[in-house]
Amino acid sequence: MRERTIQLDETDWRIIKALGENARATFTEIGRAVGLTSPAARERVRRMEEAGLIEGYRPVFNYSVMGFGIKAIILMKSKSDSRVAEKHYFRLLPAVRELEGIVRAWDVTGDVVCIAEAAVPSMKELDELLDKLHHLELHTTTYIVFEDTGELPAFPPEAAKQRA
C-alpha cells in the first residue's frame, strides 16, 4: 500500500524546521517565526499531523550530561555470508536493541544488517559492548562521534524542491 503524500509549501517547510529546532514551541512562537498568526500556524501543524507527516514529539537527550560521554555509531555485519545465516541474525537484532549502551538501532539493507547508535561512559564500556556484539556473531565497524551538532538539513531538501 502506498503512503499518502502531502503538498508542502515554503511556509510548511519553515514550520517543520521550527518544530525540529523546538518541538515544544507554542503556536504563537511558530507563527512569529514563519510569518503566520497563531491560529494559522496551529491549523497547518494540525494538517501535517492528520496527514501523518508529524508522527509525534519526542525529547532529545544529551547523553554527555548523563555521564555517557562516548557516542558511537556501530555498523554490524553477520560473520557468515550465507543467506541462511543472515536470516538467523535478523532474529538476533532485537537482542542488540536490549544491550546496555545501545540508544537506537535500525535494520538496514546491504552488506550491513544493522546500524546502532551507542552512548557509554567510557571506552572501557564501549569495548564491553562490542564484545557482547561479537558474542552474538556480529562483526562490527565502529565510528566515534566527536561532535553532534544537532543541526537540521536545509529545508526544503533539494529533492523536495525538484518534485515541487
Image (cartoon, rainbow, N blue to C red):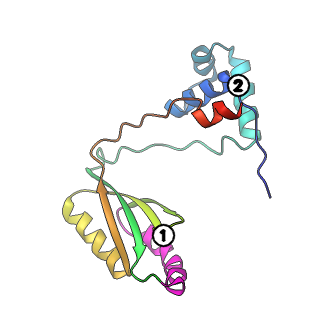
Q: Total of numbered circles in the picture?
A: 2
The magenta stretch is 82-101
Q: Distance between the residues labelled 2 and 1?
A: 36 Å
Q: Nearer the viewer, residue 24 or 16?
A: 16
Above or below for 99 versus 106: below
Quick one: label 1, few (<14), some, or many (20+) residues within 10 Å?
some
Q: Check residue 30 in the rendering and tell me which mark sits there, or answer none.
A: none
Q: Residue at x 51, y 30 (%)?
A: 154
Residue 51 on the magenta span: no
In percent of width and height, residue 51 lies at 76, 41
Q: Which residue is drawn at 38% across and 81% down?
A: 137
Question: Left or right: where does residue 76 sit relative to residue 131?
Answer: right
Q: Quadrant of residue 141?
A: bottom left
In which quadrant is the C terminus drawn? top right
In which quadrant is the N terminus drawn? bottom right
Residue assigned mark 2: 9
Which amino acid, by three-letter code, is at mark 2? Asp
Question: Left or right: where does residue 21 sit relative to residue 63?
Answer: right
Above or below for 128 versus 6: below
In percent of width and height, residue 35 lies at 64, 12
Q: Nearer the viewer, residue 22 or 139?
A: 139
Q: Residue at x 45, y 67 (%)?
A: 112
Residue assigned mark 1: 113
Q: What element carries label 1?
A: loop
Quick one: label 2, few (<14), some, or many (20+) residues within 10 Å?
few
In percent of width and height, residue 17 lies at 56, 29
Q: Is the magenta stretch mostly helix, strand or loop?
A: helix
